[in-house]
Image (cartoon, rainbow, N blue to C red):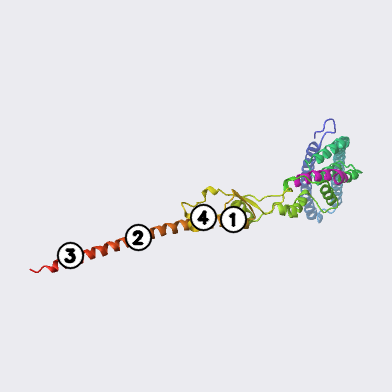
Amino acid sequence: MGGGGGPRDNSAEVAREQRAVREKELKFEREEADRQAAFRDAQLAETKLANERRNALDLKADARADRAASFNESITQQQIAYQTQKDAQLFGLQQQELQYAEADRSFYRGKATREEERIVAKEQAAAAAEAARKASAQAGYDPFKTSIESQLRSGLIGFTQAQDYLREYTTKYDMFGKEGDVNQFAKLYSEEIAPKRFETGLGAAYEEILGRKATEAEKTAGLERFKGGYYQTVNDLKESLYKGQEYQKKFNRSYLDSYYDTMYGDEIKDAEGVGTGKRTFKFDKSLLPTYGGDLAARTKVTLPSFADQFEGTPAELEQQLQNVRDSRQFLYSAGLTNLQGEIDKETQKLKNEGAKEVQKIAAQGDIYKSLVSSFSF
């Protein structure tokens, strides 16, 4: 057995001594058994011989009996001496075993004591380290809290995350009595950080959605609704702005509005930026056909003088464009009709002149016919 300067382990030596004693006992027992067997054989022989001689030698019987008794007594004394010696040896071995067992118990008691001392020392070191760790954590609590508050103010973390960080820190290092700091974070966020952040988001929402800055009245109303719980986040405010009449009038355009923007130009807005429903359509009147020659005098129709651009609702613009189309169609139709009239007139003139020539030729033919028929051959 190891263990530095502690008691030595004698288990192996005790085992060897026990085996040696046991071997001696076995040898002695075998020798004793041989002697007893020889004695029994001799006794049987003597008994047999005595029985054979008893009838003839009655006088010697007592002597033999005495010798037998003496021999038996000697054997008994030898057995007693052997048993005494054996008991003494066994007692010695038992005493030696007790000594060895006591030595082992002393060794293991020392070992257990040393192990217990080692465990206690380890526990004490762990407790000291834990105490130092908690002391260090408690000393660093205020800087940690300040850092969390700074991150919360800057928006790097949310309110719930900040609370979780602080609560986890105090729970991990058994910092009881700091629950008020968590509540203080809630008060700080609800009364200072969240309203300020919401006010910033409110201004951005009005500029992004409505394209203008929020008025003081709108800021006040928005903050009151936020503090009252009507708006949970800036997104709630944005949804409200999207549904408002101002956004609907300015930006909630239909497919038809987009179509009108494409056909007639962007909608005209008033001073407040609200759509008027009117648009401006530019018109190139140089592309409109005009009268040629004395066509105007013939048709007796005076065409209107169209402006360079039209302004009005889509229906009004469409009516103006229809007037342009009708005027253009009239000019083309009048021109074609006049051309067809000229063609018909010339055609009829040619027909009339041709008929006269035909009649003239027919009359001359009749004259020649009469002259020929007047000659008789």
Q: Which is nearer the N-term, disc 4 or disc 2?
A: 4
Question: Marks 3 and 4, how far apart in space?
Answer: 60 Å
Q: Which is nearer the N-term, disc 1 or disc 3?
A: 1
Figure check: 133 above or below 276 = above
Question: Marks 1 and 4, how far apart in space?
Answer: 12 Å
Q: Which is nearer the N-term, disc 1 or disc 2?
A: 1
Outermost residue, top direction? 5
Q: Residues within 10 Å of mark 2 (few under 14, many from 20)?
A: few
What amino acid type is highlighted by mark number 2? Lys
Q: Which is nearer the N-term, disc 1 or disc 4?
A: 1
> Circle 2 sits in a helix, a strand or a loop, which is it?
helix
Q: Residues within 10 Å of mark 4 (few under 14, many from 20)?
A: some
Residue 350: quadrant of the picture: bottom left
What residue range appears in magenta?
187-206
> Circle 4 sits in a helix, a strand or a loop, which is it?
helix
Q: Circle 1 sits on which residue? A: 320
If the image is split into quadrants, where does the N terminus sit?
top right
**Is residue 111 visible from the viewing direction of this image?**
no
Q: In the image, is 276 to the left or to the right of 43?
A: left
The residue located at (19%, 65%) in the rendering is 367
Which of the numbered marks, if any, corresponds to residue 368? 3
